[in-house]
Image (cartoon, rainbow, N blue to C red):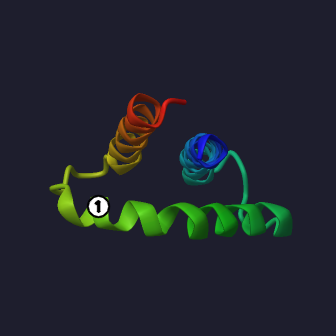
Amino acid sequence: MQSLLLLIDSVLDLFIFLLIFAVVMSWLVSFNVINVHNHFVRLLYDFLHRITNPALRPIRRWLPNMGGIDISPVVLILVIYFIQNLLREYGGI
């Protein structure tokens, strides 16, 4: 059971990393630092969007419109940290 909890904890850590990378990459694309016309950049951007968007979509529906600011990644990271703390507290990690 301990190995399964450690695996879940590691997957959640990896997802946080991918989420932060997706946010930074979206900023770089929106400020024209990197160009999505490059094939590799477009593939990476599409991959990160497909991985993170299913988890962010329900949070975006729940949060009120705040203009151009999207705080859904911050909320998702806090929820993931909460889940990790629950796993560590009750799972004995």
Residue 26, given in percent of the width and then of the height, sits at 56, 52
Determine the residue located farthest toward the left in the rendered image. 64
Residue at image coords 39%, 42%: 83
- The vertical placement of 9 against 43, above or below, is above
Q: Is residue 39 left or right of residue 68?
A: right
Who is closer to the viewer here, 41 or 92?
92
Residue at image coords 74%, 62%: 44
How many numbered discs? Answer: 1
Who is closer to the viewer here, 34 or 63?
63
Residue at image coords 38%, 47%: 76
Who is closer to the viewer here, 28 or 17?
17
Q: Is residue 53 left or right of residue 48?
A: left
SS state under label 1: helix
Residue 75, given in percent of the width and then of the height, sits at 32, 43
Q: Is residue 73 left or right of residue 67?
A: right
In which quadrant will I find the C terminus? Answer: top right
For disc 1, the neighbor class at 10 Å (few under 14, some 14 to 19, many from 20) is some
Please say whether residue 70 is visible from this viewpoint. no
- The vertical placement of 51 against 67, above or below, is below
* Residue highlighted by disc 1: 60
Q: Is residue 7 left or right of residue 65?
A: right
Residue at image coords 59%, 65%: 51
Amino acid at circle 1:
Arg
Please say whether residue 34 is visible from this viewpoint. yes
Residue 63, given in percent of the width and then of the height, sits at 20, 55
